[in-house]
Image: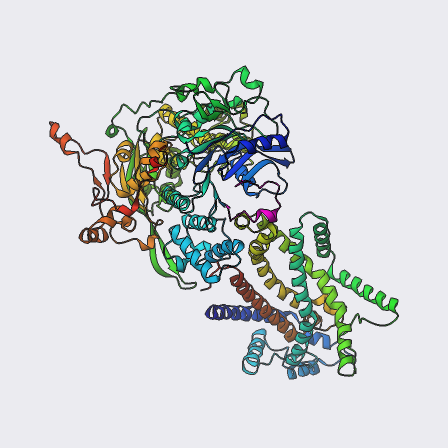
């Protein structure tokens, strides 16, 4: 066990005495000790008690993961440590950095520590760098502040060194570049370079990868890992994603309603959670590496409003195990029987160990079965078919006379079909053409390049508005941002009535249908007269789904339907989508960047890269036996909420970002980033660069073929790569041998 | 950069040509100086009027198109903008007027900008404190009070100072005292004439810059990049002045460039009240005197100043914002 997390004593002692005691008990080698940290904000509605007593000790070189839903006080805790909260915030408790108290220091005195011994990386790399200064100037500034005597050459040399360390190619030239010339992932690397410029002892990373693509997330996590190794800093990693911290953290602190509710070593938390909230969080995350399907665990309700101090356990209103004793007072963080360092704030933590199944605790719904599941795919009718759909955008230059300087092939020759009762997903990085594909389907115009067939109606026949409106009844859409997709001035009734009125239903029928829809998506029918802002994010997404289902479509297009939601809420929406598909016999076309969600809900999946499908097939086949190197890289980039697996598994870290479609090579689009290509002999590389690999089916394995009496049908998996079995380039493979760290 | 400026310059020259031509047609078809001549005593015969107009190149019998061609040819070949009905040459008058306007407004524009932006930053840094409330309230007041009234108030103030002291320190109207000795005495006389209009225009003008600069800076004070700068070890005030200020100045720089022409061409009230006969008052007079050529010339001047302002705005933006690329 690497570091120790201690509990603050009871709340009855006076502050001074409590801090004194805490100081005596704190391990002397802790680089950062936080005791009874508490933050209050005065708002118009009253005092919000955002952080209520956080204690932890951070040892040098170790990583503490702070996990929780939005509003749990994770970020406020980190900003309080940095002294970056607005002056209206009341902060109390103690934050000791190498034995020196930081709380209560003036802004000026804090500047000694900020950026020097204490550094921070923020969530949104796009807005965190000053747009009007070069990247070099911003790194040099961090050096100048704390090393006023350093020479200009030395600072510049150090800046180059830092940029090289975080993996920015040709760092000397890039010093003069401005932030807008960098992609999001690159900017986050620059942020890390700035943070580690002065070899900090403590590095706080607040959701450092939430805004990034999975492949870029893997790169940035790798950079953070390198940075920690180079500087020996202790890291506080704040995240809502249990997968991200599983591989990197030594200890975990789970926060809920401003308080730590469970703390302990990473293995204790993941394999032996003792607080129902932690159990729920773990059960709510779909797994990309598990084929067996079980329903996700939704945590009903919302986090409490922190204006009122909870009288009982703050999680009690959402807890399935709640009893009267839980309401009698807020439980303190107490050691879990059998492990002194594992603490949980639950009066029932003793009975939750061992083999208690989270699905039983939270009463997860049974896996829904669709009437189509028993019918072979070939015998079901096709609801959507795309034949060689293309969307090319001309790239022009010049103000008056436009010169065509190239073509962006946003979608390039896409063909697939979706059968009844099936969920088909498209995955890929941002810029791979997923959204353009959806837009092309929704466009449904006869002048499109390629044919779109929706419920047997072809876009080539879609000349009149009647054909189009018939098509719209077959296909409906659910959008990513549930808040933006609902008119704030429409009541739920009006939102749901609009498509029905368009379909020409009479008032009585509309009223009946709306009540039916509300029940269908799990909302209370008497809430129809409320406005969207009176609902939570998850409920709003349910309204969006109800709106899409109003006209009884056969196919629902889901554009990142859960990416804006917290994990616990996300689980509920995913379960709902799963149930609706089974009950109503719907088909889904799902676009998502979260491969775990895709694996959980889909039957078939297509992986897109630069406008082309590189691999397509049955979801279990593609995910368990990926053939295309890009699919393999994508899958390996997804963090899994399983610490032991995360520590030992081999990761493929793709180099760089998605290239500009202009630079796409003539042959295989992926060649520029391909880990297999990099290791191929030049003769074979030539083939990748000049010939475009066709989408070909996977051959049935030879032993299976030999055993079968008849020739086996080709399995449902096709991919576009010449050398699927090629060796991967060593440089792009990373294994963290963290097992050593944990050796006694 | 130069190529870009040249390209923009050509576009604007074309636009100036269009607006000026359109303005000329409007003026020539609605302004009839011959009618004014007939109010003279003794009343001239129509032949006499037409004759005198023809001599000045203002022949009322020609069609608007013929007069336009004649007028344009004179400008293109001889840079001759024609004559007024009273016989004055536009070119000569124009130079005097522009010089007077420039002298009247130049100092106050610079003061307005500097004071407005500085007060904007000052009040943003002290948001909702007493200083901020006082300054911002004043700016809104200056916004609301009509300019002529504010100018009169400043004049009254200057007069009361003169009366209190018992000596004429400030001149509230006019450009200079005729027949003054050159040298020190002339310099003091100039200051005495300059002080009142400059103070008046500045006091009225800075409000809008103060409000804009304060607003844009406040938008950026809590930006993520300011937080990053603080996380590097800058104090809040250092982070704001080094990082937020420049970003907040981008929209202000643009608006500055566009308001300069408005001040130059629209300074009618100031010119009238302080009796500085500049371009603004000339343009109004030209219309009341049915002076086709003078009205068109002031219009052309306004377009040129506006184009300069627009180019200046582009230039200022590229200067402060590296994201804007020039090509």
- Establish if A636 lies above or below A259: below
Residue at 79% in and 82% down = B180
**Does A619 sit left or right of A209 as displayed?**
left
Is the magenta region chiefly helix, strand or loop? loop
Percent x, y for residue B177?
79, 78
Q: Position of residue A166 (x, y in %)?
A: 40, 50
Residue at the image point whose x is 14% and y is 33% from the top:
A702
Can see residue A123? no
Magenta-highlighted residues: A97-117
The residue sitting at the top extreme is A324
Say whether residue A107 is magenta: yes
Does B22 lie within the magenta span?
no
Q: Determine which quarter of the picture holds residue B55.
A: bottom right
Dividing the picture into quadrants, the one containing residue A584 is top left
Residue nearest the viewer, comparing A123 with A520:
A123
- As drawn, B92 above or below A556: below
Q: In this view, does B9 lie to the left or right of A474?
A: right
Q: Where does the N terminus of chain A fall, quadrant-wise?
A: top left
Residue A676, horizontal then vertical, whole percent: 24, 46
Q: Quadrant of residue B268?
A: bottom right
Q: Nearer the viewer, residue A727 or A65?
A: A65
Q: In this view, does A271 lie to the left or right of B263?
A: left
Quarter of the C terminus of chain A within the rendering: top left
Please name whichever residue, A149 or A391, is drawn nearer the observer in this view of the structure. Answer: A149
Measured as percent of width and height from the top left, residue A49 is found at: 60, 32
């Amino acid at each position: 066990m690497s570091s120790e997390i201690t509990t603050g004593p009871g709340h009855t002692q006076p502050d001074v005495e409590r801090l004194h005691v805490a100081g005596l008990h704190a391990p002397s080698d802790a680089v950062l000790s936080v005791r009874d940290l508490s933050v209050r904000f005065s708002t118009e509605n009253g005092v919000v008690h955002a952080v209520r007593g956080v204690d932890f000790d951070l040892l040098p070189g170790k990583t503490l993961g702070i996990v929780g839903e939005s509003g749990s006080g994770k970020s406020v805790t980190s900003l309080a440590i940095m002294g970056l909260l607005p002056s209206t915030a009341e902060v109390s408790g103690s934050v000791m950095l190498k034995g020196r108290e930081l709380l209560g220091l003036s802004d000026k005195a804090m500047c000694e520590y900020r950026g020097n011994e204490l550094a921070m990386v923020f969530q949104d790399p796009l807005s965190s760098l000053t747009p009007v200064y070069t990247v070099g100037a911003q790194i040099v500034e961090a050096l100048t502040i704390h090393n006023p005597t350093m020479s200009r050459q030395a600072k510049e040399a150090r800046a180059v060194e830092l940029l090289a360390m975080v993996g920015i190619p040709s760092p000397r030239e890039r010093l003069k570049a401005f932030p807008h010339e960098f992609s999001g992932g690159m900017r986050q690397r620059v942020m890390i370079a700035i943070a580690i410029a002065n070899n900090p002892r403590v590095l706080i990373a607040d959701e450092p990868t939430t805004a990034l693509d999975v492949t870029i997330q893997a790169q940035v996590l790798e950079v953070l890992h390198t940075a920690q190794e180079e500087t020996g800093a202790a890291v506080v990693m704040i995240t809502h994603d249990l997968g991200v911290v599983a591989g990197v953290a030594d200890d975990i602190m789970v926060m809920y309603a401003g308080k730590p509710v469970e703390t302990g070593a990473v293995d204790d938390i993941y394999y032996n959670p003792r607080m129902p909230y932690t159990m729920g969080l773990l059960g709510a995350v779909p797994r990309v590496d598990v084929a067996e399907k079980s329903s996700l665990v939704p945590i009903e309700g919302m986090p409490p409003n922190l204006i009122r101090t909870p009288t009982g356990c703050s999680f009690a209103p959402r807890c399935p195990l709640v009893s009267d004793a839980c309401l009698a007072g807020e439980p303190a963080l107490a050691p879990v029987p059998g492990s002194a360092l594992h603490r949980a704030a639950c009066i029932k933590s003793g009975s939750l160990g061992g083999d208690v199944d989270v699905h039983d605790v939270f009463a997860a719904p049974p896996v829904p079965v669709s009437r189509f599941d028993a019918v072979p795919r070939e015998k079901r009718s096709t609801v959507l078919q795309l034949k060689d759909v293309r969307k090319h955008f001309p790239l022009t230059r010049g103000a008056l006379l436009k010169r065509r300087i190239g073509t962006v092939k946003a979608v390039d020759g896409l063909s697939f079909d979706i059968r009844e009762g099936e969920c088909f997903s498209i995955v890929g990085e941002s810029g791979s053409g997923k959204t353009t594909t959806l837009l092309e389907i929704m466009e449904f115009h006869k002048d499109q390049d390629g044919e779109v067939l929706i419920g047997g109606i072809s876009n080539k026949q879609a000349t009149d508005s009647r054909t189009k409106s018939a098509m719209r009844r077959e296909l409906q859409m659910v959008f990513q941002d549930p808040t933006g997709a609902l008119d704030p001035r429409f009541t739920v009734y009006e939102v749901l009535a609009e498509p029905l009125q368009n379909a020409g239903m009479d008032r009585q029928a509309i009223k009946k249908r709306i009540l039916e829809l509300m029940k269908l998506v799990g909302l209370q029918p008497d809430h129809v007269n409320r406005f969207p802002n009176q609902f939570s994010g998850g409920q709003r997404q349910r309204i969006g789904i109800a709106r899409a289902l109003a006209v009884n479509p056969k196919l629902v297009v889901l554009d990142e339907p859960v990416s804006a939601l917290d994990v616990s809420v996300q689980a509920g929406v995913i379960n709902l989508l799963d149930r609706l598909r089974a009950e109503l016999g719907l088909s889904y076309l799902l676009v998502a960047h979260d491969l775990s969600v895709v694996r959980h809900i889909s039957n078939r999946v297509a992986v897109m890269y630069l406008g082309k499908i590189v691999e397509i097939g049955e979801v279990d086949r593609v995910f368990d036996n990926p053939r295309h190197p890009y699919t393999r890289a994508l899958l390996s980039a997804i963090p899994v909420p399983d610490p032991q697996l995360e520590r030992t598994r081999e990761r493929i870290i793709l180099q760089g970002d998605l290239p500009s479609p202009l630079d796409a090579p003539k042959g295989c689009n992926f060649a520029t980033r391909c880990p297999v290509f990099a290791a191929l002999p030049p003769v074979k590389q030539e083939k990748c660069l000049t010939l475009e690999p066709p989408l070909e089916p996977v051959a049935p394995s030879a032993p299976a073929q030999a055993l079968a009496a008849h020739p086996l049908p080709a399995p449902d998996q096709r991919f576009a790569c010449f050398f699927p079995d090629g060796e991967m380039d060593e440089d792009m493979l990373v294994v963290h041998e963290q097992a050593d760290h944990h050796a006694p | 950069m130069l190529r870009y400026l040249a390209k923009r310059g050509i576009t604007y020259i074309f636009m100036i040509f269009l607006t000026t031509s359109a303005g000329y047609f409007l003026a020539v078809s609605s302004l009839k100086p011959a009618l004014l001549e007939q109010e003279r005593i003794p009343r001239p015969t129509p032949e006499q009027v037409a004759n005198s107009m023809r001599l000045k190149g203002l022949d009322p019998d020609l069609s608007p198109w013929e007069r336009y061609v004649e007028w344009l040819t004179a400008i293109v070949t001889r840079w001759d903008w024609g004559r007024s009905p009273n016989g004055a040459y536009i070119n000569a008058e124009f130079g005097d007027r522009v010089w007077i306007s420039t002298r009247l407004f130049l100092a106050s524009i610079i003061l307005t900008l500097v004071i407005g932006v500085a007060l904007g930053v000052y009040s943003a840094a002290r948001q909702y404190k007493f200083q901020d409330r006082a300054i911002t309230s004043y700016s809104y007041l200056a916004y609301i009070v009509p300019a002529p009234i504010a100018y009169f108030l400043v004049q009254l103030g200057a007069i009361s100072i003169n009366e209190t002291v018992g000596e004429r320190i400030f001149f509230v109207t006019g450009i200079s005292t005729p027949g003054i000795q050159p040298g020190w005495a002339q310099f003091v006389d100039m200051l005495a004439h300059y002080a009142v209009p400059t103070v008046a225009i500045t006091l009225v003008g800075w409000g809008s810059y103060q409000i804009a600069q304060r607003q844009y800076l406040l938008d950026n004070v809590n930006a993520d990049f300011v937080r990053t700068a603080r996380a590097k070890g800058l104090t809040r005030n250092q982070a704001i002045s080094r990082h937020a200020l420049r970003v907040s100045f981008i929209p202000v720089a643009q608006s500055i460039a566009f308001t300069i022409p408005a001040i130059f061409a629209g300074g009618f009230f100031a010119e009238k009240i302080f009796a500085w006969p500049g371009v603004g008052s000339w343009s109004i007079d030209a219309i009341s005197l049915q002076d086709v050529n003078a009205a068109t010339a002031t219009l052309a001047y306004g377009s040129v100043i506006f184009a300069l302002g627009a180019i200046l705005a582009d230039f200022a933006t590229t200067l402060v914002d590296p994201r804007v690329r020039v090509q």
